[in-house]
Image (cartoon, helix red, strand yellow):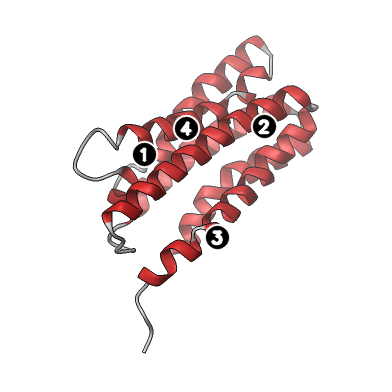
């Protein structure tokens, strides 16, 4: 059911974008908070487990989005992607020092049997990617107008993530199960 997971992952960003186009950043922020907690609930109902990435995003959106709504200043919701990417990067980096396997290996080894050194490199690559995304979000939020930031947040990061995943293909393809 990868289509359901993809829809769950994309829905909050698309709802945020639609609410921004229809109203403003404040309505969009409230919609984003509700949508992220909706995704946490939907994932729970679907899989009977909490998806930690969705939960982190929902909590950070509630905190930073709540401050945005309270003080009526969009700067705080603009920090949400940076905070989420920073948490993800820190978790990936910390996994090199805690536990027997890195986080990427724990998440993906059932679907993709890779050698331990490759998992460690992939884990570090994703950590670096998330650090770069955190910094890029700060840059776009500061250097461009709000509408540009909203578009980049909604579509730019999704495109970057897709390209980053595709860039892994040459390194992992030889470990994929062969079709007869």
Q: Report crowding for label 4: few under 14, some 14 to 19, many 20 or more residues within 10 A (C-alpha).
A: many
Q: Position of residue 108 (x, y in %)?
A: 33, 56
Which quarter of the image is occupied by the C terminus? bottom left
Asked whether disc 4 touches disc 1, contact meaning CB atoms under 8 Å apart, the reply is no
Q: SS class of the residue under badge 3?
A: helix
Mark sitting earlier along the chain (1/2): 2
Residue drawn at the location 29% of the way across and 37% of the way down: 96
Residue 83 seen in this snapshot: yes
Q: Residue furthest left?
A: 100
Q: Report crowding for label 2: few under 14, some 14 to 19, many 20 or more residues within 10 A (C-alpha).
A: many
Q: Nearer the viewer, mark 1 or mark 2?
A: 1
Q: Residue furthest bottom?
A: 180
In space, the residues marked 4 and 3 are separated at their CA atoms by 27 Å
Q: Position of residue 172 (x, y in %)?
A: 42, 64
Mark sitting earlier along the chain (1/3): 1
> According to the image, label 2 marks what residue?
28
Residue drawn at the location 69% of the way across and 14% of the way down: 73
Q: Report crowding for label 1: few under 14, some 14 to 19, many 20 or more residues within 10 A (C-alpha).
A: few
Position of 75 relative to 18 (above/below): above
Q: Nearer the viewer, mark 3 or mark 2?
A: 3
Position of 39 relative to 119 (above/below): above
In space, the residues marked 1 and 2 are separated at their CA atoms by 23 Å
Q: Position of residue 68 (x, y in %)?
A: 62, 17
Residue 52 is marked as: 1
> According to the image, label 4 marks what residue?
58
Tell me how many marks there are.
4
> According to the image, label 3 marks what residue?
166
Position of 10 relative to 88 (above/below): below
Which quarter of the image is occupied by the N terminus? bottom left
């Amino acid at each position: 059911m990868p289509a359901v997971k993809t829809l769950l992952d994309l829905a909050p960003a698309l709802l945020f974008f639609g609410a921004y186009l229809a109203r403003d950043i404040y309505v969009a922020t409230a919609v984003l908070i509700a949508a992220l907690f909706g995704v946490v609930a939907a994932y729970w109902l679907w899989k009977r487990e909490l998806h930690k990435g969705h939960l982190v995003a929902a909590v950070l959106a509630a905190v930073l989005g709540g401050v945005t709504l309270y003080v009526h200043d969009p700067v705080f919701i603009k920090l949400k992607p940076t905070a989420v990417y920073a948490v993800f990067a820190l978790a990936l980096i910390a996994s090199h020092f805690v536990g027997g396997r890195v986080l990427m290996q724990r998440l993906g080894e059932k679907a993709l049997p890779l050698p331990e050194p490759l998992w460690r490199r992939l884990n570090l690559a994703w950590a670096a990617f998330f650090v770069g995304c955190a910094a890029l979000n700060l840059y776009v939020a500061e250097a461009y107008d709000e509408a540009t930031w909203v578009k980049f947040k909604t579509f730019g990061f999704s495109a970057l993530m897709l390209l980053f995943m595709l860039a892994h293909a040459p390194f992992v393809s030889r470990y994929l199960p062969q079709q007869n």
